Structures are given as structure tokens and as C-alpha cells.
Image: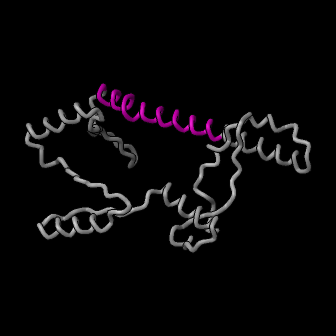
Amino acid sequence: MNGPPTVDVWDAIEADASAFKNLTTEGGGELSDLIQIASDIRKQLSKAEEAIKSLKESRDRYLYDLIPAKMAEMGMDKVEVDGNKVSLRTFVGGTMPKDPIARENALAHLREIGAGDFIQNVLSVSFGVTQDNSAKALQADLEDKGFDPEAKTWVHPMVLKKLIRERVEANQEIDLDIFNAHVGTIAKIEGA
């Protein structure tokens, strides 16, 4: 085995850990303790993530609102004390609209204002699993016509996992190292 699986164990913990408290079979008490600890860690992690999010929001309030407002009020755009500098600068954020109509309007606007050169185009064609030769032929034809097609040849991650699992279960040949594959056991904890 080359390391732990990439499955998020915390997603597997869906049950109320206290429901396992009364396990009485051999090792059941230890299993109950392990489940409770895993559940407690998941809760602590969730709280820590919320605390980090809150700290980032506080930091951003100071950096984007409070300090710039105070410096503007004082008529400053830069201050230096003992080699420590604080300066104001413009920041910009923006995203293309997700709504298809709004996206087309945004692209039309860029073209209208002479910024069409910043628009990128990707033209892609999907080929089925039995069309590998057709894909290669089209790529060669486009290259012959002076285009530089970007080709992506891949196996969908879920399909790859299924293929590896089926071949391992059937004792058929597959090089696990090539795919950085991990075969192991994971506990999935579900509620009643």
C-alpha cells in the first residue's frame, strides 16, 4: 500500500457515535470508544474551520475597511514606522457571470470596448471510448491545417476506480503503482 486512501473519512461518519456505546461483543467497547473519538474529532475540526473562517473575515474587515478608512480620514495613502510599512493600493476582483445570458452580455461588452483580445476560446469535442482512432485522426487533420489543438486523453476518475477494483477483485493484471492506487479497507459508519 502506498499510503492512505483519498476518501474523506469524515464524510463516512454520519451516525450518532453515542449509539455505539452499548456494544457488548468482544472488542465492542474499544470499537465504541474509537467511533466516539472519531466523531469528537470531526466536531472539533468543524469548530476549528468555523473559527478560521471567522478570523479571515475579521482580518479582511481590517484590511479592506477599517484601516483604509482611517488612513483616508487622516489623508494618508502610506505610512512607515521603524521600517514597517502600510500602504493603500487598489484591488480588483471580478468573475464572469455564470448565467449564460449574462455571460454573453459580458463577452459582447468586452468586444464593444475593444477588449475582445482578452477573450479565450476553447473548442472541444468529446469522443466516446470506442472512438480513439477518430480523435487522433481529427487532431492530426487540425494540426495539418495549422491549428494547435489541445488534446486531453484521460480516463474519468470514477471509471478508473471501478476498473482497478474489478481487476483486483478478479485477480487480473493491473499495475497499481502506475495509477498510485490504494487498495484497503475503510469503515463507513451510518446512522440507524
Q: Identify the residue at horizontal 19%, vertical 65% (top origin).
A: 148
Q: Identify the residue at horizontal 53%, vertical 62% (top origin).
A: 163
Residue 125 in the image, given as x and y percentages of width and height:
26, 55
Query: Which one is nearer the viewer's eye here, 22 or 58?
Result: 22
Query: Quadrant location of residue 3?
Result: bottom right
Q: Would you say 192 lies left or right of 95 here? A: right
Region rendered in magenta:
45-73
Q: Would you say 30 lies left or right of 87 here? A: right
Tell me how many marks there are. Answer: 0
Residue 189 in the image, given as x and y percentages of width and height:
71, 43
Q: Identify the residue at horizontal 64%, vertical 48% (top origin).
A: 9
Q: Would you say 107 lies left or right of 50 here? A: left
Q: Would you place residue 67 above or below residue 177 in this image?
A: above
Residue 27 in the image, given as x and y percentages of width and height:
88, 50
Query: Quadrant location of residue 85?
Result: top left
Query: Quadrant location of residue 105?
Result: top left
